Image: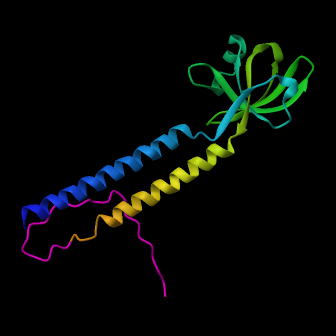
Amino acid sequence: MSGATLREMEAKQASRMNRSLLVTAAFLAVAVGGGCATYQQVTVPELPPQQRVRMRLAAEELARNIAFASGNQGFVSGRFVEERGDSAVFVLTSSTGFSQVVLPVDAILQLERRDAAQGRSFLLSVGLVGGVAALAYFGFEGNQGADTGGDEDPVDALVPLVRFTIPVGR
């Protein structure tokens, strides 16, 4: 194998690696910046029934509902049920369960409404599909020309990280 051919193959491999790194960086940017929800600060009278919320509670209420707290800032998540005078009913949720509680309105230090971010959800979906397509493309492209024809030493080739097999019936 001539030196020029080996250099060309190394340049192609480096180009493929740069493209795969670029695709990976773009995918990570979309995944990190593309959350599927936004939060807006509201008050209890502004909430419709079944609205998903997160809230920061006063210390005594947080202590009673610590099983539903998430993060180090003490937020609890759930759904608004109804307002009852100077208190409100919520169904608090966590990864392990849920509970309906009545909270005094003055014990809610911060209340945020959770709304779906359709634009971000769309971008995240496009990023995921594009990332999978790029991985498949680079994986299949890396197998082209891998057969050197016999006596020559094989050159390092791009090895796909993920292989997809699609069974095709008759």
Q: Where is residue 7 drawn, in percent x and y?
A: 14, 58
Task: Give left or right: position of 100 versus 153.
Answer: right
Task: Give left or right: position of 96 versus 101.
Answer: left
Magenta span has 158? yes
Q: Residue at x 18, y 57 (%)?
A: 10
Task: Give left or right: position of 124 versus 168.
Answer: right
Q: Residue at x 91, y 23 (%)?
A: 84
Vertically, is 33 above or below 111?
below
| Residue 113 location, quadrant | top right
- Which colouring convention does the figure follow? rainbow
Magenta span has 126? no
Residue closest to the eye, 77 or 48? 48
Residue closest to the eye, 167 or 145? 145
Vertically, is 136 above or below 100?
below
Q: Quadrant of the N terminus?
A: bottom left
Residue closest to the eye, 19 or 105? 19
Q: Where is residue 16 drawn, in percent x and y?
A: 30, 56
User: Is residue 74 something one can see in this rendering?
Assistant: yes
